[in-house]
Amino acid sequence: MKRFLTILILLSSVSLFAQSAGNECQTAKVRAFKQMKSMGKLYYPGDQNIDVTYYKLDLNISYSPQQITGAVTIDAKSLEDNLTSVFYDLQNALTVDSVVAPSGRLTFTHSGNKINLTLDRAYNIGELFEVVVYYHGVPGSSGFGSFEFSSHSGHPIIWTLSEPYGASDWFPGKDSPADKVDSCDVIVTAADNFYTVSNGVLISEVDNGDGTKTFHWKEHHPIAQYLISLALTNYAEYDNYYVVGQDSMIVRHFNYPENLNSTREARLNKTVGMLEYYHDIYGLYPYFDEKYGHAEFGWSGGMEHQTCTSIGAYGETIIAHELAHQWFGDKVTCATWHDIWLNEGFATYTEALWLGHVYGEGAYDDRIASYMSTAKYAYGPIYVQDISNVNSIFNYARSYAKGAVVIHMLRGIVGDSTFFNILQSYLNDPRYAYNSATTDQFAAVASAVSGTDLTYFFDEWIYGENYPKYRVEFKRVFSDSNYYAIVTLIQNTNTNPRFFTMPVQLKITTEQGDTLVTVFNDAVNQSFLIEVNSYPLSVEMDPNNLILKDILGTTDVEDETLPAEFTLSQNYPNPFNPTTKINYALPKDEFVTLKVFNILGEEVAKLVEGRVTAGSHSVEFDASNLSSGTYIYRLTAGKFVSTKKMILLK
Ligand SMILES: [Zn+2]
């Protein structure tokens, strides 16, 4: 889903919100939420004892008076033995007339927006049962307008937008994105001036001869309850065809007749190019055996209803966004509204990919830069904490812009080919394809495909909050023949995570050209020694803008000339009691050992063992536990070996 609005309005409200809340409690909250999540407590689960498998919506819709009369068939499987009662979600505003099983009427109560049913017998695990709910009334309107009666240029229109919780405003079922039905039928009877558009393919259009028409649509693929949609008005159709090999699919755009013009057609025509491009990067359009299309509706944005986006704004990026949702959102659906970034982050990211594909890499970079500046206003973790609030779930800075930036950063870490492998593996994984997935499940795919444990990345960017702010220090170290840059990255401390662990690209500009290296920054204050081939002039952190960050400043630290040769100096003081200092110098990085022996040649102390950077170094030797006498210390650094004597006098 995407709302067409000015981001400025949104940003000012977000930043006010950010200022008014403390960070300390957020950290604790995130921990609590992660814990609750691991216990499975945060889903809005619907009835957890059943798996719904099929809906048939048979609806009579009257525009004047505004009312619906419905017979909704629900098939479900028991997930428990001895199941004798279930509940379905339906808002109290609608009146349930009866609930009927094949064996007869069932007893029920309807309160708390739930229909509680007593089944006709006990059902065991895996057993299927079917009920038909007969109901009528005026559907409620929640969220972004779950069921609306409105008009365009004097013509009546009826449309739905159920995400996230609005489906139960107009039909009964299990209102949880994780439990898709295997297929559904949508049959609508309305006045014959309405053309009804819904999911899947049109099975029949019947003129009832009494001033009404009945449209029967069927979605053959699994579908989440919130993606089932209706749009009814006096549509004018406009078609494209999407061809793959010998096959083709219709792309049908249902427009208000008064709005269809050549400009709009030119924009809608881009849909086919998008289908082709997304096929290349994400795999074949998931509903190729059905259709894709747009149905104009009364909300100034778009909503990715399965196989038929409802749309009220016709910009190129909104068309690109909603189509991307057919893969990210419809084919693989976020399992809970906490995980909404799996829908919105990917659809938003795909806008940038599309722009890059059509207008060049600079257009991709510009779009990402724009997401980054918005993402800096994101308040709290991307993993949505308050899913009772629609505006919290669909917060643009957080679920959309920062979600997209996280995906861009993942691409930066794993590289292009692995990145697209991750996405295709996720979309085609039999556990998630035409089903749902959680953040942790996506993260597990990303780690498995990349062969790298990326838990740190998702923990800090999805469950953590804010973004890193770096200071960069740059120091040149050189001799006649060796040149090094020492780059120190210092992060401002954050709350959760305390600092950000990330691979960081550093571009060192030298007298003879640029060197690009990637260092793994996993400390709040960390130095990296980079060998270059000539005198280093400057450093640029993250030159390809792969990280959401602020760079607070880059400081040049005084040059240091490297020693011309290896040296081991006489200790000082000497004789000593009980400590003394030993200095040595390295013209380049070496693996160094510095050991102390007694006059019998027995090792009594190991002062250095490991890789040491070029430069002058000093080590203190504490001989408190040794007795008076002569000792020998030996430095090895690569091929260089040097030995000296010292005297301990107690
Ligand atoms: Zn969206």
Image (cartoon, grey):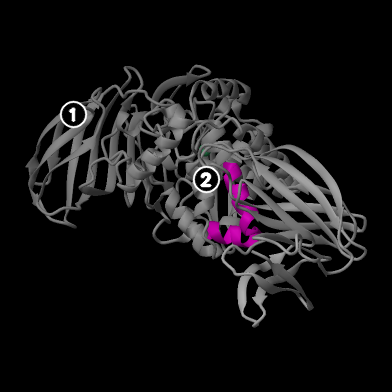
> Is residue 481 placed above or below 1 in the rendered structure?
below
Asked if the magenta segment contains residue 490, the reply would be no
Question: Which numbered dot is residue 581?
Answer: none
Which of 113/389 is in front?
389
Q: Which residue is mark 1?
A: 96
Question: Which numbered dot is residue 460?
Answer: 2
Q: 10 Å neighbourhood of mark 2: few (<14), some, or many (≥20)?
A: many
- Rendering quarter of residue 37: top left
Q: Nearer the viewer, mark 1 or mark 2?
A: 2
Upstream in sequence: badge 1 or badge 2: 1
Q: Disc 1 and disc 2: Cα gap in Å?
A: 47 Å
Answer whether labels 1 and 2 touch (C-beta < 8 Å).
no
Provide the secondary structure element on which disc 1 rests.
strand
Q: Quadrant of the C terminus?
A: bottom right
Which of 390/634 is in front?
634
User: Where does the image place residue 599, in percent across and percent down from the top left?
Assistant: 67, 80
- Rendering quarter of residue 60: top left
Stretch in magenta:
404-424
Residue lying at the far bottom in this picture: please name it. Answer: 600
Q: Main secondary structure of the magenta part?
A: helix
Residue flagged by tag 1: what amino acid is it?
Answer: Val
Q: What's the residue at 90%, 56% (across, down)? A: 535
Q: What's the residue at 49%, 25% (across, down)? A: 298
Residue flagged by tag 2: what amino acid is it?
Answer: Glu
User: Where does the image place residue 220, in percent across and percent down from the top left?
Assistant: 37, 52
